[in-house]
Amino acid sequence: MSFPTESCFVSVCNGWDEGLLRHPANKFLHKFEASFAKGTMYSSAEPFGTWHTDDFTYTDELGNTTTGAEAFEKERETYKTFLSEFHHWPLYVIVKETTEGYDCFGHADLYGNYKVPGDKTVTDPEGKSWQFKSSGTWRITYRKDAKQPDGMKMSSMRLFVNALPLAAGAVKREMVPQDAMLLNAY
């Protein structure tokens, strides 16, 4: 039996490599990640709406969904609560064009440093040392917007990650009590 198929851009990558960045949605995501990691996304120069649609939805690793400016803050809180610095290293990304924009599914490693100092025991592929590494998968949708420099804005993000390594490091560094972490997460 034959099944209908649709064309997709598939990239098995090693970070933000040239092959991955051939697609405009991945170029946008690379710029987004740089602004997000550096924190400029949350400044007055780049307020909510610069990168996200007004109805942006964010679904965290526990399945909690928020919308609009609240989603923007929740997205930020997911990383900035414990990490002082972080970087995503894409490994696999699939992009499908839709009538409204793009639907993307990808997998990446996340490297980070906690807000509390500690040993840097993990090295990323570029040779930088970090305190933390975890893998995660995401689904992101983009809506085309001709007024934007990159021609699109992010309309939704859903994370599929195992947050336990991050949580364990936060508990180990006494950033949060163990019982509070378990009660808030599950």
Image (cartoon, grey):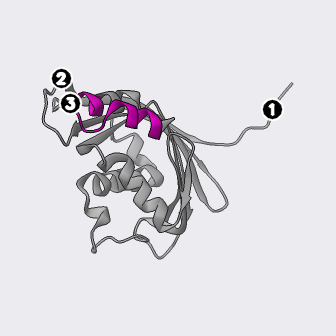
Residue named by callout 3: 131
Which circle, 1 or 3, is nearer the viewer? 3
In which quadrant of the rendered view does residue 91 lie?
Answer: top left
Q: Residue, x 43% and y 61% (percent of image)?
A: 72
Which amino acid type is marked by label 2? Thr
Q: Which residues are magenta?
A: 169-184
Residue to which mark 1 is pinned = 3
10 Å crowding of disc 3: few (<14), some (14-19), many (20+)? many
2 and 3 marks in contact (CB < 8 Å): yes
Q: x, y (%) of residue 178?
A: 35, 30
Residue 81 place in picture, x, y as percent: 31, 48
- Return the x and y of residue 145 as percentages of the image width and height: 52, 70
Q: CA distance from mark 1 to mark 3?
A: 45 Å
Instruction: Residue 164: say if magenta.
Output: no
| Image vertical order of residue 70 relative to residue 105, above or below | below
Location of residue 66 with respect to 124 vertically, above or below:
below
Say left or right for 80 vs 75. left
Horizontal side of residue 3 vs 45, given as left or right: right
Callout 1: SS:
loop
Asked whether 76 or 122 is in front, the reply is 76
- Provide the residue designation for mark 2: 121
The amino acid type, in three-letter code, at marker 1 is: Phe
Q: Is residue 93 visible?
A: no
| Residue 145 vertical position relative to residue 24 in the rendered view, above or below | below
